[in-house]
Image (cartoon, grey):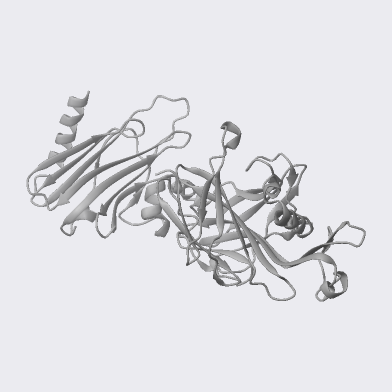
Amino acid sequence: MIKKMTAMTLLGFACIGAAQAGDLALSVELPRIDVAEYHRPYVAMWVQNKDSGDVTNLVVWYQLDKSGEKGEQWLKDMRQWWRRSGRSLDMPVDGITGATQQPGVHIVDTKNLKNLAAGSYKLYVEAAREVGGRELLQIPFEWPAKSSQLLEVQGKTELGKIALQLTP
Amino acid sequence: MMKTKLPLIALLAMSLPLVANAHRAWVLPAATVLSGENAWVTFDAAVSNDIFYTDHAPMRLNGMKAIGPDGKEVEMQNQHTGKYRSSFDLELSKEGTYKVFSASSGLRARWETEDGKRGFWPGRGETPAPGEFEKAVPKNAKKLQVSQSSRRMETFVTAGQPSKTVFELQNEGLEMQPITHPNDLFSGEKAQFRFMIDGKPAVGVEVTVIPDGSRYRNSPNEIKVVSDKKGVVSVEWPSAGRYWLEAEYQDDKAAKPATTRQGSYSATLEVLPQ
């Protein structure tokens, strides 16, 4: 299963052309969870500079509600993201926010990291699910990368495998 | 009603500090960090033995107030007072930090009457009018003790980005001036608060912090700290949850006719997990 995921992940990276110079490619797996009442998780992904604490948001998936802002009520459940960034944003945010996603492996758009300054960073992926749990994963990395690296971390409950491909 | 009840507690606190701890007044928000437009928060308010268990008496709401991020009063909606607790709701229609509080201050006196009984002023259920002290308290009474006493109880909730307007000091009694925002507390982190007495740093304030859930353990697990020269205390949160903070201060720098000055402060705080 894990091997298959990796294969899929790499395939995904290949498709979006991760091999370009000075690039970051990210895939995030949302596990299939077998429960009576399943709601797609809210997921936030961001990169934080170790020294300055500056946050760059990649993606925030939440329940977009056309009629009102009911879906925004639960944004705070992504507690670290809410603290680091969410509470200072006026939702929705173009180029960051999107609808919740189905279980599976998702290739995440990293265009917001295009002009990432050199430094030490942490990638954070935080998921919170209605009537479910919460999980926060992190991958530390140096930018720009000195060599081609595939950094992975495996979630236990609300998240599956997170893979960050760095290309110098 | 609240004003009438608190002075009595204050009097007890003067003579028997341990007894005053038996009943604790608190107001507990159902959530302290909120997102989305027009978030609502519901509150419980009570006086009880164990923190956050409604086992003694409801808090009367007529002495309580809520103010919003703009400093203006916010209506406490859907008020209800039952056997053991009061409850109300706040609609957070503006972004920022809201404060729910009650505060009172004034002179208190106790003495021994000519027939050897205990005299005290103001009496139970009385809110004295200005100038009444001169008439009501016998100046040459035995063992006359007059104190300038203040009491304040607070809690905070934030919609969206935290703000600081509600921390503005009244420069009266014992107050807390947050250094760490009280709606930005996380387990394993350290928070700092500054205590002020009549607008000046209060040195040597005894602060006790009690975590929620004492019913399910054998010891209260209190954290005790004392304010430094700048009136500052540091508290490191051992775990996520709700906490009740109580601060007590006393000195002899009172304005006449008082001989002692004392302040008590309490707050309900929520600490979130990392």
Up/down of B134 relative to A79, above or below: below
Q: x and y percent of residue B125 in the render?
A: 83, 58
Residue at 36%, 56% in the rendered image: A93
Taking the image as shown, residue B36 lies to the left or right of residue B25, namely left
The quadrant of the rendering that contains the N terminus of chain A is: top left
Res A37 seen here:
yes
Relative to B66, A73 lies left or right: left
In percent of width and height, residue B228 lies at 48, 62
Residue for point 86% across, 70% down: B138
In the drawing, does residue A77 fall left or right of residue B244?
left
Q: Is residue B38 visible?
A: no
State the residue at coordinates (82%, 64%): B121
**Hey, which quadrant is residue B155 in on the image?**
bottom right
* Place of residue A165 in the rendered image (x, y in percent of width and height, measured from the top left): 15, 42
Q: Nearer the viewer, residue B38 or A158?
A: A158
Out of B170 and B72, give the one closest to the viewer. B170
Describe residue A158's horizontal placement relative to residue A147 as left or right: right
Residue B255 screen position, x and y as percent: 69, 75
Query: How many circles with numbers are drawn on the protein?
Result: 0
Please name whichever residue, A137 or B94, is drawn nearer the observer in this view of the structure: A137
Instruction: Give whichever of B207, B238 is nearer the camera.
Output: B207
